[in-house]
Image (tube, rainbow, N blue to C red):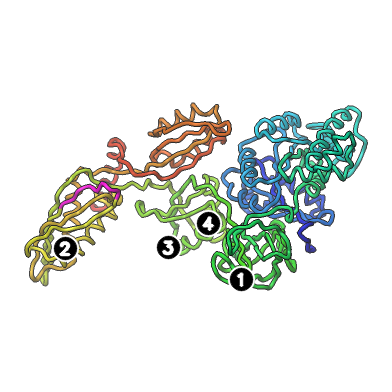
Amino acid sequence: MKEYGTEAIRNVALVGHSGSGKTSLTEAFLLNTGVTTRLGKVEDGTTVSDFEEEERRRRISISTSVIPLEYRDHKINLLDTPGFTDFVGEVKSALHVVEGALVVVDAVAGVEVGTELVWSYCDEYRLPRFVVINKLDRENASFQRTLNEVQERFKAKLIPVQLPLGEQANFKGVIGLLSMKARLGRGDQLADIPAEYVEAAQAARTALMEAAAEGDDALIEKYLGGEELTQDEIVRGFHNAVKAGLFVPVFVTSGTANIGTVPLLDSILRYLPAPNEHARKVHVKDGEQELTSQDSGPLCAYVWKTTADPFVGKLTYVRVFSGQLVGDGRVWNQQKGVEERTGHTNVARGKELIAVKSLHAGDIGVLAKLSATQTGDSLGDKANPVTVDPPTFPRALYAVALAPKTQADSTKISPTLTKLCEEDPTLRWRQEPATKQTLLEGMGDQHIDVAIRRAESKFGLGLTVEPPKVPYRESITRKAEGHHRHKKQTGGAGQFGEVFLRIEPLRNGAEYEFGDELVGMNLSRSYLPPIDKGIRSVMETGVIAGYPVTGVKVIVYDGKEHPVDSKPIAFETAGREAFKKAVEAANPVLLEPIMRLRVTVPEANMGDVLGDLNTRRARVQGMTTEGGKSVIEAEVPLAEVLRYVTDLRSLTGGRGVFSLEFERYDVVPAHIAQPIIAAYKKEKSAESEE
């Protein structure tokens, strides 16, 4: 593959709901640009962009793949993104490094949940976009119905650049409104427009010309003066209008039948901006500035994706925002403060790596075996630092508890989970001290399932999975006293320690305070640290249900020691047992995490969602409307929403979204706490019998 300058590059993300045909459309582009000799099929696992084992098994895209196309002396970097909502992190990463997007809409299903989601992300990034009405050859497909639905849902100014030549089984090609020719098949055979379509095509061309005139002051004067715009003028004006976000062009295709795909490639070159037409906000030494992609600028290569392959090693996907990235050189990682050797510069086409001498400003490529660099880092010149902010990813909504299957797996679990989370910023793992579980958190059950399978297939890590426990805590509600004498004689030197202590609830949100009111010579203060240590050990393991104790003030007010047998270990034991007795006498309670829940749903689902929340012990704080959707703010116990992502999707047909944030700990109602405490006591008695 030859090198391409900035003006000849187009970076485009293919986005849309799962199953709208993005990967099949990519296959048609690959065939039409001579990369492949036949169309790969998702159902056969033969596509270039779905190359991972899990993607072929599930027949869906899971990660974004880069597909560079060489077409008419230009290079189109096509980023084929997943459509399933669990993998939104991949979509956001891709949209962060492109100048335009193709929003693919199924001509049968119309606007779906994923369509709404990616449209909102395109708005967030202010990206120029095309609407591609795909699968127009399917039964029940309708161009006009789908066009009306997109128009109604997104309130965008849609301008068809093509009209379909027939529909469903009769979909034969497209009518190009720029050339006013029928383009049959894939779009490179020209014919006259059939008579029954001429009137509609002329009206649509007038709308296209008006939109083009709005993109250029000189053209609007000419058009209002009654003159026809030339083809070149329409292209120039419409390019400016699309770049400015004034209009959204509409195209019609069938990826699987390879109909209408060549004119779409032409339109990407004509109407979407090149990297040097799109300024990017970056951080420099003196603050922020707008940076335009050009080879002569300071080097800034942003890492938007990393993959760890046990055979190839680490692959780092970069977008060169400025400057030129040359192979076998050295770059400075601005975030990590280390130098990296670049080795060979490559471009990726699915799983294939193609070596190139350098990557020009605006290009997307791959570096192999960088040691310290991670997703979100910026590479460049140490003396002239330029950094790009990473996108804001949604917070994790679903968690599972993991445990290693074997002793060998236990040594691999930490580094493997770290690698998986480096690859995917919407995944995170952590140890939950309250439950002593290893938690993996992500966007949904499919997301987590894919991550666990990757851990097994890529890194040979065997894992068992179970639902996470709720990180309850224990606390007290009144003052109480505890006393314990520890006495042990074993033939030699014995152990002796006696402790009297008082506990009371802490009201200021603090977890633990330790003090004393010792007077006289009964107990030396040198034994206070071991008493404190014993108490802290109980606070970690719990008293009534095995959860950490919090919100307790402890005062040691008396004790006894023995001149020979008293040792720190004796007072540690005495302190521990005295504290347990005091807690049991202080009306102990279980506390549970209360979350702040924000649910956004279509108006039609409002009643169902509210009814469901009532069954989850939720306290609704307020209801508002945003962008035509209902927003519910509520407080809800974490125990009631551990699987809410799945439940809300089924309640709302996938159209509901939510966020969760920790708010505070609150007392668990007695009827819920009692079975938890009883189960713990039963478990402890079973252990003691063993």
Q: Quadrant of the C terminus?
A: bottom left
Which of the two labelled residues, at mark 3 and mark 2, occupies the earlier sequence position? 3
Residue 522: name its quadrant: bottom left
As measured in the structure, the alpha-carbon distance from the residue carrying label 1 to the one carrying label 2 is: 60 Å
Q: Is residue 225 above or below residue 346?
A: above
Task: Mark 1 vs mark 2: give the one in front.
Answer: 1
Label 2 belongs to which residue?
571
> Relative to 119, is 441 on the left or the right?
left
Q: Position of residue 214 (x, y in %)?
A: 78, 39
Say which mark, if any, is on residue 383.
1
Q: Which residue of the protein is positioned furthest toward the right in this rendering?
A: 192
Looking at the image, can residue 311 be seen? no
As measured in the structure, the alpha-carbon distance from the residue carrying label 4 to the one carrying label 3 is: 23 Å
Say which mark, if any, is on residue 407.
3
Which of the two labelled residues, at mark 1 and mark 4, occupies the earlier sequence position? 1
Q: Secondary structure at mark 2?
A: helix
Q: Quadrant of the N terminus?
A: bottom right
> Relative to 71, is 120 on the left or the right?
left
Label 4 belongs to which residue?
421
Which residue is found at the position 81% from the left and 40% from the top? 212
Query: Pointer 2: residues within 10 angstroms few (<14), some, or many (20+)?
Result: many
Q: What amino acid does circle 4 point to?
A: Cys
Which of the two labelled residues, at mark 1 and mark 2, occupies the earlier sequence position? 1
Looking at the image, can residue 485 be seen? yes
Q: Secondary structure at mark 4?
A: helix
Q: Secondary structure at mark 1?
A: loop
Which residue is found at the position 55% from the left and 46% from the top? 446
